Every structure is written in C-alpha cells, then in structure tokens.
Amino acid sequence: MRPTQRRRPPLRARLKAASLVLAVLAGLAAYGGFRLAEWPGFEVQRVIVTGNGHLSAEQVVAAAAVPHDRNLWLLPLGPVRRRVESLPWVAHVRLARRPPAFLRIEVTERVPAAVVPLDAGAAPGFALVDPGGHVLERGERKLWGYPLVRGAAPGAANFPRVIADLETLATEGVRVRELDVTPLGELVAVTYTRLRLDLGDDEDLSHKASLVNPIIARLGRRVAGVAALDLRAPGTPVVVYR
C-alpha cells in the first residue's frame, strides 16, 4: 500500500498566512515603539554644550529651547540647529544624541577681527565683526580690543581684503589700533603708540610692514618726536617729525 502524500496549502493561502504574521509583528513593533516613546527614561535630561567661548552654555541652551518633556530620540534636530545658529557668535552647530537622554551641542564660534563704526544715521555706535563683516556685537562705544577699521564697510567687496591687510601687519609684528582706507584706496594705520603709518596701497604690504620695527629701533629715543613713517615708497622710507 502506497503512503498517502500530504498536500501543501495553495500559494495564496500561504501568502495570506505570512501576511497575517507580518501584520501581527508590525503591530507588536508599533506598540513597542509607542511604549518606548512614552518611556520617561528617554525624556531630555541634560543638554551639554561644547566649543563655546564668548557665549555661555546658558545662552546656547536658551537659544536651543529643547523641551525637557520630549523624547530625545523623537526630537527633530533641524529646528534646534537653526535656533542656535541664529545667535550672532555662532558659525556652525553640530548636534548629537547621547543615550539615554542627553543632547550634545557643539558650536563653532565666529572669530572677531575688527571694529567698525556704525552708520550715524541709523544706529550710532560701533560693531565688532568677523573677517566676513558679520556683526557679532554692537555698542555705543568701542568696547573691544580689536583694530578700528574706517573707510571699508562690512558689506563692501574690499572688506575681506582690508581684514587680510590687518593680518599681514600683525604677522610682521605691527600692531595697529586703527586702519583707515582713504577714498583713493590707500592705507593709513595708527599704532598703539599713536605713530601714523602711511602705507599707500596694499601691494607689497608685507615688505612695507617689515620696515616699521627696524626703523623704530634705529631711531631709538628720537622716535618720541616722530609723527609718521611714510612707507608708500618702501625703497626710500621717510620719517616725518612733529
């Protein structure tokens, strides 16, 4: 007698059974996800701020405005990033979730470069700006120890080049308290000892700046009677006495 072969269920029945199993598993996963979302252990417990120098951690946390009753893992980070990047000092922001419920905010601050006078017709005073002319702080007086730049507005095309000129002077050991750009595009700097430097255009500025300290050293005590150094022709620098 031949053994009876067991018939396999039709394909449609097998697919229906598999779909039912998948639906049950999906339901269980959704329920588990819901329960995890409701678990108090994932609610934001602490916001950690790094990379800040001029800004306090409290200022960054306040700008982030992260609700402490929200599940960290369901919190949309895009709005948090945009709120922190709206702070004048902030250039870039990186956010990272840390289990179980910590949010890390790493800020990259802008670098101050100069002080510029504000338009007297709008808001008189001064502004601290970065190399790109982005305003970091404002004040009625010059409150910051950075060079004052006149004759080049932060939004002007030549402003980054003027900031680069300041860096060139500093590299050659010439610290200036003020740098004026004349209508003809020539540079006039004033040192912290109130010595005026007539630099002309910024062609070969590094060479012109390298002459300043050797000339001052050669003058010795006589430098007290010097009003300016004319370096527009670096081959024949001129000492201008008071």
Image (tube, helix red, strand yellow):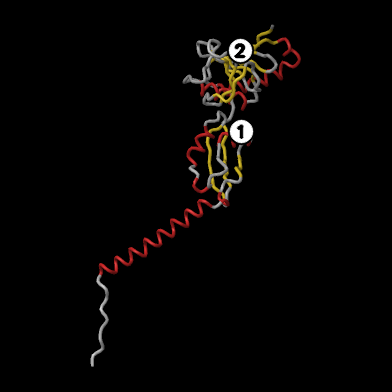
In the depicted view, which residue is nearer to us: 217 or 137?
Answer: 137
According to the picture, the residue beneath numbered tag 1 turns out to be 59
Closer to us: mark 1 or mark 2? Answer: 1
Which residue occupies the extreme right position in the image? 221
The answer to whether residue 233 of the structure is visible from this angle is: no
Number of dots carrying numbers: 2
- Residue 24 image point, x, y percent: 39, 62
Which three-letter amino acid code belongs to the residue tagged 2? Asp
Q: How crowded is mark 1: few (under 14 residues within 10 Å), some or many (20 or more)?
A: few
> Do the residues under discs 1 and 2 have CB atoms within 8 angstroms?
no
Q: Give the quarter of the image for residue 48.
A: top right
21 relative to 33 in the view: left or right: left
The answer to whether residue 151 of the structure is visible from this angle is: yes
**Mark 2 residue element:** strand
**Mark 1 residue element:** helix
In the depicted view, which residue is nearer to us: 168 or 107?
Answer: 107
